[in-house]
Structure formats: C-alpha cells, structure tokens
Amino acid sequence: MAGLKEVAARAGVSVRTVSNVVNDFPLVAPETRRRVLEALEELQYRPNAAARRLRGGRSGLVGLVIPEIDSPYFGELASLLVQEAQEHSWTLLVDQTDGDPDRERRLLEGMPGQMIDGLIMSPWGLSPADLRRRADAVPMVLLGEQDAAGLIDHVSVDSVAASAEATGHLIGLGRRRIAAIGVQPHLANGTARQRVAGYRRALRDAGAPHDPALEVPVDALHRADGARAMGRLLDEGHAPDAVVCFSDQLALGALRVALERGLTVPGDLAVCGFDDIEDGRYATPSLTTVAPDKAEIARQAVSCLADRLRRPAPGAPRTAPEAAPPAGLPPARRIVTPHRLVIRESTAGRSR
C-alpha cells in the first residue's frame, strides 16, 4: 500500500504538504491540493485510521442521520454528501430513523460503537428543545426545516417561499380550488408546517379562497399516501382543479389516482410536487416541481462541518438550552440554499 512518501513523489511536493492535504488543513494552494488529491487517488492511498486517532483524535468518520434511506430525495442528497465528504478524505456512516424521536435522540449523541468526528442530521421527530439539550461536543450540522435556536449550524431551503411560489404558479394558471397534500400535524419538524404557511400566503396574496377541506393530512410523504389523499378529496366531494403536494412522491401517487378516475392532467387537474426527484422527470405527464439545490445543500453542510473541525471546541460540552457557543468558535450559521420552480407537463401541458 502506498505511503505518504510515494504520494509526495508522485505529486512533486513534500511529505508535510501531503499530510496537510490528508488532514484537511486549509493553508494549501488549490493547485497543489489538486495534484496531491490526484496522486492519492492514483496510488489508492488509504490513511491509517488508528494512527490518525492517536495523533489528532480524529477518525475520518462522519455520521449522516436521515429519516429514510429509501426516499429518492434523501438518497440523492446522501450521494451528494458522500461526494463532498470524499474531498476531505472522510468516510460517511449513514443511519436512518424513520422519524422516530427516541432513535433520533440516541443518534443525536453519536453513533454507537463508532468514533465519529462530526454529525450531519435531518431530524423529523425531535423538537428544537431536544436539539438544544444535546450534550455531545461532536460538531454537528442540521438539515431540513427544524432549527435549534441558533446553537447549531443549519442548512435549509426556504420552504415557505418555495411553497408560495408553487401555489402562485397554479393561481396564475387560473386555478381556484387548489388543494394541499402533505399536512403532518403528528411530526415535530417544520417541513409541512412551513409549506402550509407558504400555500396559505399565496392564496391570501392573490385573494383566492381558502377552504380548510382542501388541506389533506398524510401519515408519510410516500406515493401511497398521496394516492390515498387524492382519493379522499375526490370521494368526499372536494374535487380540486389543482393540487400542490409537499413531496414529489405524494404528487406521483396523487397523479396516478387522478388518471385512474378519468381526470386529465393538466386539463382537469394541475399537479405540482416538491423535491425534483428523478422519477418525476420521467413520469407521464412529467411533474412540475420545486427543485431545491441539493448539490449546494451538500456542499454547505460539509463546508460547515469542515470549518468546525478545524476549530475544536475547548472545554466541556454545553448542556443548557440557553448556553452560548463556546469561546473562540464562530456563532452557529443558518444558511438558506436556493430553489427554483421547474415547470413541466403536469401543469403546463405538452409542447406542440
């Protein structure tokens, strides 16, 4: 197996420079870093994890905790996070919680049996108070709509603005009975709550009617839940002329039931989703959707974690909800990443 000397010779740099790149020290010129990374890849260099732990207390392992591994959205995001982590020579350990608060609470304190350097987490079941009570000092980045009152770095999408934009698009098409599928009052996370807020804001701003019967709760954000929600709307006499769904999976399920019931899309019913998963691009009709910048979410999350790992927190971990960030560390950041509305056949029809 290649060592640092062989990598240094291949890249034309010193052993110390290779060590700096492997340990992700920031003061390395971009071109030098590129040459070293290429040499590391060509020689298939693998750092000695045990030696790294002894030298610097770092394992090179980062935890990723997401609600659902089989969700297309989280699957795409996890893949992008793996790619970003590789740029820092990190290995990503992935676990799922199904939104169960007890499991999230356990994983919040670290992955059992693993010495991880940092944690990236998208919580569904934990409240902001739960997150603020975290006792583990391992650097952490939050994904999604749940916040921790400014005590943890947080990367998110503006779900209120995104949902309002999607609803406004439907209103602009002349639709007046616009349903919202995806309300989740049983979960602590703010995803559904924020998307409902954006939906209502768009209706209010346009002077469009708001009918509470058109806000349909779901147990999960899957295709079957979207299908049941659309069936319920049609069976209970609340047939809409448009629907904004809080995930693309919900939208695909709703689309299927609408077509089975003889509705034309987008003629009788315009359908909009959220997430821009691959399935929606190849559905018939293709799915209009809100597209979060998943690559930017991954880049910002890993960048935040890398910055924290360059500045280890001194002293004991904080435990009080009102505690301030440790001295010497920058304050927690809240980064809102871009999104865009992608208009396809399910609202605009086919191009001639």
Image: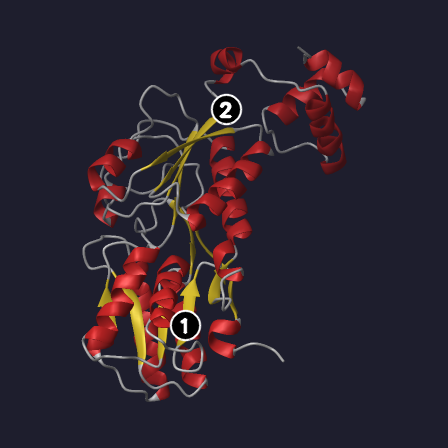
Q: Quadrant of residue 36?
A: top right
> Does dot 1 land on a helix, a strand or a loop?
strand
**Viewport quadrant of the N terminus:** top right
User: Where residue 308 appears, x then y in whole percent?
Assistant: 47, 36
| Residue 219 against residue 94 in the figure, above or below | below
| Residue 233 against residue 46 in the figure, above or below | below
Q: Is residue 317 left or right of residue 15?
A: left
Q: Residue at x 28, y 42 (%)?
A: 98
| Residue 346 against residue 54 in the figure, above or below | below
**In the rendered structure, which amino acid carries the disc numbered 2?**
Gly
Q: CA distance from mark 1 to mark 2?
A: 44 Å
Label located before the other in sequence (1 or 2): 2
| Residue 207 against residue 106 in the figure, above or below | below
Report the disc number at residue 306: none
Q: Quadrant of residue 105?
A: top left
Residue matched to label 2: 60
Residue 105 seen in the current view: yes
Closer to us: 20 or 205: 205
User: Where residue 20 appears, x then y in whole percent?
Assistant: 64, 24
**In the rendered structure, which amino acid carries the disc numbered 1?**
Val
User: Where residue 127 appears, x then y in whole percent?
Assistant: 23, 48
Q: Is residue 335 left or right of residue 198?
A: right
Closer to us: 233 or 306: 233
User: Where residue 8 appears, x then y in whole percent?
Assistant: 75, 18
**Viewport quadrant of the C terminus:** bottom right
Closer to us: 193 or 118: 193
Residue matched to label 1: 271
Q: Quadrant of residue 209?
A: bottom left
